[in-house]
Image (cartoon, helix red, strand yellow):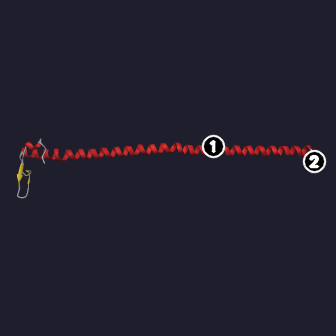
């Protein structure tokens, strides 16, 4: 269906089978009509459709990257919290080990003093 702007040309031909625009005549006005018909009723709408779809694809990809970045950022604090908890656990174990070593050293020291001070008492 021709657009209202191009409709003023009104170059239609009747064939044996169908009614269509006159694309066989090579007059200047007929060629102008055919090029306007091609440009405004095919190239322009297809260009708008392609540009719209490209815009949609670009927006979806940008949103996917932002969402992926948000997921990565949200996982980092959890990972750092887990590593912090592991660090605290290792520090606690080290302190506990030092505390037991000090207790053992104190017991050895006391035992050693007792043996030196009163050797007959322990035999």
Residue 16 coordinates in the image, percent (x, y): 5, 58
Viewed as shown, does residue 1 lie left or right of 56? left
Quick one: SS at disc 2? Answer: loop
Residue at 90%, 44% in the rendered image: 116
User: Residue 51 falls in which quadrant of the image?
Assistant: top left
The residue identified by callout 2 is 121
Viewed as shown, does residue 37 lie left or right of 86? left
Q: Earlier in the sequence, mark 1 or mark 2?
A: 1
Q: CA distance from mark 1 to mark 2?
A: 46 Å
Q: Is residue 25 visible?
A: no
Residue 56 coordinates in the image, percent (x, y): 31, 45
Residue 87 coordinates in the image, percent (x, y): 62, 44
Quick one: SS at disc 1? Answer: helix
Q: Is residue 118 visible?
A: yes
**Tag on residue 77?**
none
Residue 122 coordinates in the image, percent (x, y): 91, 49
């Amino acid at each position: 269906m021709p657009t209202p702007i191009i409709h003023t040309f009104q170059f239609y031909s009747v064939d044996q089978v169908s009614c269509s625009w006159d694309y066989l005549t090579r007059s200047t006005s007929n060629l102008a009509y055919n090029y306007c018909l091609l440009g405004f009723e095919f190239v322009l709408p297809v260009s708008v459709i392609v540009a719209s779809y490209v815009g949609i694809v670009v927006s979806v990809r940008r949103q996917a990257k932002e969402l992926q970045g948000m997921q990565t950022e949200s996982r980092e604090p959890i990972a750092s919290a887990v590593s912090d908890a592991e660090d605290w656990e290792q520090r606690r174990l080290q302190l506990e080990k030092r505390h037991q070593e000090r207790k053992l050293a104190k017991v050895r020291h006391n035992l050693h003093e007792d043996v030196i001070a009163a050797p007959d008492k322990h035999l």
